[in-house]
Image (cartoon, helix red, strand yellow):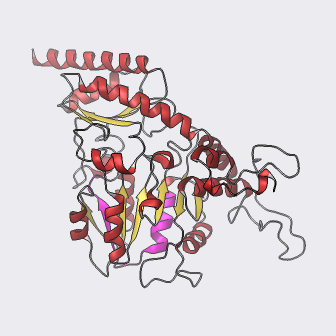
Amino acid sequence: MTPDDLDWSASGFSTRAIHAGQAADPTTGAVVPPIFQVSTYKQDGVGGLRGGYEYSRSANPTRTALEEALAAAEGGAGAAAFASGLAAEDTLLRAVLRPGDHVVVPDDAYGGTYRLIARVFGPWGIEHTAVDLSDPDAVLAAIQPGRTKVVWVETPTNPLLGIADIAAIAVHAQSVGALLVVDNTFATPYLQQPLALGADVVVHSTTKYIGGHSDVVGGALVVGDGAQLPVGLVGPTGTTSLLDAVRFHHNASGAVAGPFDAWLTLRGLRTLAVRMDRHVANAAAVVDFLSGRPDVAEVLYPGLESHPGHEVAARQMSAFGGMVAFRTGSESTALAVCAATRVFTLAESLGGVESLVEHPYRMTHGSVVGTALEVPDDLVRLSVGIEDADDLLADLARALDLASDLAQGSQS
């Protein structure tokens, strides 16, 4: 057996991320999969496809390498790579929902997810209930047997960093034949494995930690082994296989990852483990610093023992991630902090090597203002990067001091 023939499924995470789906190029021996920047493929006679490739919307070798690596990283049966995280979400929901169906969503869901479910699928006849997913009993109460086809989980949530017990919610979803979908973007497959805890499918915005360098937009679905469509639904291929349905809609809708985007995302996946170790270490330093500041009203981070989801997070995550949120006591102070940082860049998105700061109420979660999912206007969200921790702490100290001075000046 040659190294290119190995089954990497029993290997460690980093080994899978570096090698699964990424055998050396058979023609040149290149150790990194090439970018197949091509739209179509020569056929050896009508229907005589080489390796199954005919048109790059349907399949592309670079995208195939990424999908195999993502499936291996999450411990799934297969994956599909998309042009964005929301394209992945949209394709999944089209595949599993029909008018009249019902979805349970987090009451602090990512604004883009809520907008998609409420304002795109809502007029199509899909109803939803927003619920505190940290309470499995509340999830059970929100499920409508026969109508609820999807229970949508984020853990940790964006931006309030709430924690949901994946295994407990899986039991409730399975009891009514609904799918458990887990958005694993914040945790990444390195820190959390939702499929092993009972989820049917994992969603990623690969733009974030998996890509990791703020230079590519993408999304992915990873489907668990044996996962089936919601009870009573047969897919367009005539089977109840969730993976078959996802792959059909992936091709039919066409929001696929391009080859260069797939290549960049695959490059990011290879270094995910080492980057996450640094993100986690820096986030812990930031949390310790913020917790000691009298001008910070509250720090939200599942690694804190005071966090209501700490015990669950400690059980289902190997570490607590690189996202931190804190409250300042007033919207004006939060805005002043966001305006004053220099190492933390004021920008949306997250998960890149550089640290970012944002004001969710006015930025990433502006679409849920005025709804049950509205976030506090004094909240600041940090995506803690991999810079030197001392520089990050100094930057936050200066920004908080300036914001405090402005607040005191406005009161005098």
| Residue drawn at the location 31% of the way across and 44% of the way down | 161
- How far across and down, in percent of the image, does residue 59 sit? 70, 63
Task: Confirm whether the magenta stretch covers residue 95.
Answer: yes
Outermost residue to the left: 412
- Residue 125 visible here: no
User: In which image quadrant can residue 310 be found?
Assistant: top left
Q: Position of residue 180 (x, y in %)?
A: 39, 66
Q: Is residue 95 above or below residue 236?
A: above
Residue 40 % position (x, y): 79, 62
Q: So how many labels did they put on this image?
A: 0
Observer-nearest of 138 and 365: 138
Q: Is residue 57 above or below residue 261?
A: below
Quarter of the image with the N terminus in it: bottom right
In the image, taking residue 395 as reference, residue 23 lies left or right, namely right
Residue in front for this viewpoint, 306 or 103: 306
What residue span does the magenta drawing correspond to? 86-108
Residue placed at 56% from the left, 42% from the top? 211
The C terminus, quarter of image: top left
Residue 265 in view of the camera: yes
Q: Examine the structure image and report whether residue 265 is included in the region drawn in magenta.
A: no
Residue 257 quadrant: bottom right
With respect to residue 181, does 306 lie above or below?
A: above
Residue at the location (41% across, 25% down)? 344
